[in-house]
Structure formats: structure tokens, C-alpha cells
Amino acid sequence: MSFVPILAVVIPCLNEEECLNSTTTAIFTVINNLAEENLISDKSFIFYVDDGSTDNTWSIIETQNKENQRVKGIKFSRNYGNQKAILAGLTESVKYNADCVITIDADLQQDENKIKDFIIKYLNGAQIVLGIRNNRKTDGFFKKLSALAFYKFMNILGVNIKVNHSDYRLVSREVINVLNTFKETNLFLRGMFNELGFKKDYVYFDVKPRKCGKSKYTPFALYSLAMSGITSFSLIPLRIVTFVGFIMSFVSFLIGLSAIIDKFTNNNPVPGWTTIVVSIGFISGIQILCLGIIAEYLGQLFQEVKARPRYIIESEVI
Ligand code: UDP
Ligand code: MG
């Protein structure tokens, strides 16, 4: 008999009470169809990660679990952010014998009907299947622009993240076991899956508008995500800082030298108040920026050195 994998669908959620019932129904429709086609096992399940919701999200998950044991879930002790919720979902769901795990958002903005494509690519041997957005129609101008800038910047820094790759992805149990040997607290998943190697494949999907509730991603959360992505994967910004410092010292040395020569040969004191004030302002700006970059890395180091647990699970229903 051919291999019929158990699939876990991991869904991170923060205050998604309005979405959960319709999401569970939609995912079960997909799972049940796939099980009928014998592509996945009928033991496949949904695994919710409640990322410290303050509404009824957790009690809805508990109720769903009482009705159907194929809805499982864990609840964080507080809000840890969507990346940690996804990571916890991967780590915890394989404990219940999942062979492969797909992560998808609770608002089902990612097309759940593509789950079949992920499974087919997995059955054909891919260990990691990445979901790539066809477009960003549903995103505002700011989000589109910042996402583009981020991916381009990461590519320049030598981190080859696939552009418009999302957190809609399938990962095999083998890959999750390897991922769990990485000890850092701040895991930037999109970079990590790139770093790991393994056979990869891609599924392209359209992003739908949010069908219920509100977006939980603030511009600040996106900024922190981008920063931790950069500082956990690239040392190039630090090298740029050193390089800029070196160039600036060299240029200042030349300017100083020419001023001294000017004074002695032409007896000409350095003219120009404006030049001095402008260059002081400019150079201070660069210095503060450089300190900021170094501080980002120091902050990253600070958190890693403390080696606190990645997340704390308060309750679970299995
Ligand atoms: N989410 C989470 N923790 C957070 C923020 C978001 O678990 O701190 C979940 C959220 O419930 C959703 C997914 O992450 O399932 C994506 O969030 P959202 O749809 O708000 O982001 P957007 O699609 O607007 O980028
Ligand atoms: Mg969304």
C-alpha cells in the first residue's frame, strides 16, 4: 500500500473568534476530500495555536475539540507574535504523529483549496513546499512597498529569500526535527527554511481579502519582523558600518591636510561656517545610524544569550 501521510494544519490565531468556526469548517472540507481521495490519512487534524488572545478564541477551540478530537490546540501564556505561534505549531503538532504540517492563517486569506497542490508536491518528494503569492492586491500601498524593499534588501545582503514567499507552507516531519535542533530564540522562519536546504517545491496562490475580523499586523510589528530577519541572517550591515567609518576618517584626514597646507601656503584660514555645520550634522546623523545598527545586533545577542524558552504553553486540548 502506498504511503498515506497524516497532515496537521497549523493555524496561528490572535483574537480570531469571528473566523474560527468558518475556518474549521472550510479546512475540514478540504481535509475530508483529500482523505477520500486517499492522498492523506483520515487521522489528519487541525492544530490551533492561540497566541495569547483576549477574546473567546480559546473557548471556541475548546468547544470544537470536545465535538471533534481532530481539532487540537495549544494556548500561549501571552502574545508571542505570529512567528513564534507558527514555530510552536510545527514543533507541537508533530508530537501527535503528523507526517507533514501545513501552516495557514486563521482568516484563510490564503487559498485553502491549494492544500491539495502542497500535498501532491510533498508526495512527489518535496520536503518543504513554499506558498508564493501571485500578487499583493489585498495589501495597501505601504505594505506592498515595504515588502518589496525588504525582499530586495535581503537579497542584496546575500539572504536568498524567495520574493513574496508567505507563511503558507508545508514542512515534513524530518525538516521539523532538524529545525528543532536550532537553538536560537528568535527564529526568522522565512530565512531559516532557506538555510536548511532539503528538496523544495513551490505552490502559487492568490491572496483573498480577509473574510472576517481585523488584521493583527501593525506597521511596527512588520518593522520588528524585518529587523529580526536582517540581524539574524546577515552581518553585512555591520561591515558597511566599519567601511563607512573608514571612508569618512580617510576623507576627513584629506580635508584636514588640505586645510593645513592651505593655511601655510596661502595664509588662508579655512572659510565657511556653513560647510562645517552641514558636515557636523551629516556626520552625527551617520554616527547615530551606525550606533543603531550595532545596537540592533547587540539586542539580538542579548536575547539569545538569555536563552529563555521560545514560548510558554498555558493550556492544551488534544
Ligand atoms: N497572528 C498571531 N499573532 C500575532 C499576530 C497575528 O498569531 O501577534 C495570526 C493571526 O491570527 C492570523 C495570522 O497570524 O491567523 C496572520 O495575521 P493577519 O491576518 O492579521 O495578518 P495580515 O494577513 O494582515 O498580514
Ligand atoms: Mg490576514
Image: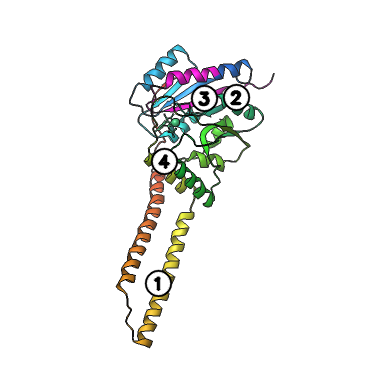
Looking at the image, do the residues carrying marks 1 and 4 touch, with CB atoms under 8 Å apart? no
Which mark sits nearer the N-terminus, 4 or 2?
2
Residue at which label 4 appears:
222
Residue at which label 3 appears:
9
Mark nearer the viewer, 3 or 2: 2
Q: Quarter for ligand 2?
A: top left
Q: Is residue 258 left or right of residue 31?
A: left
- Residue ID at (39%, 50%): 296
Which of 108 and 237 lies nearest the eye of the viewer? 108
Task: Name the amino acid type tagged 1.
Answer: Ser
Task: Name the amino acid type tagged 4.
Answer: Leu
Residue 43 visible in the snapshot: no
Give the distance between the C-alpha atoms of the residues marked 3 and 2, in whole angstroms: 12 Å
Task: Name the amino acid type tagged 2.
Answer: Lys
- Residue ID at (43%, 21%): 20
Residue 116's tag is: 2
Which mark sits nearer the N-terminus, 1 or 4?
4
Which of 212 and 260 lies nearest the eye of the viewer? 212
Residue at which label 1 appears:
252
Residue 189 visible in the snapshot: yes
Which mark sits nearer the N-terminus, 3 or 2?
3
Question: Picture coordinates of residue 115 (x, y %)?
Answer: 57, 26
Which mark sits nearer the N-terminus, 4 or 3?
3
When asked about the image quadrant of residue 79, the answer is: top left
- Residue ID at (40%, 53%): 293
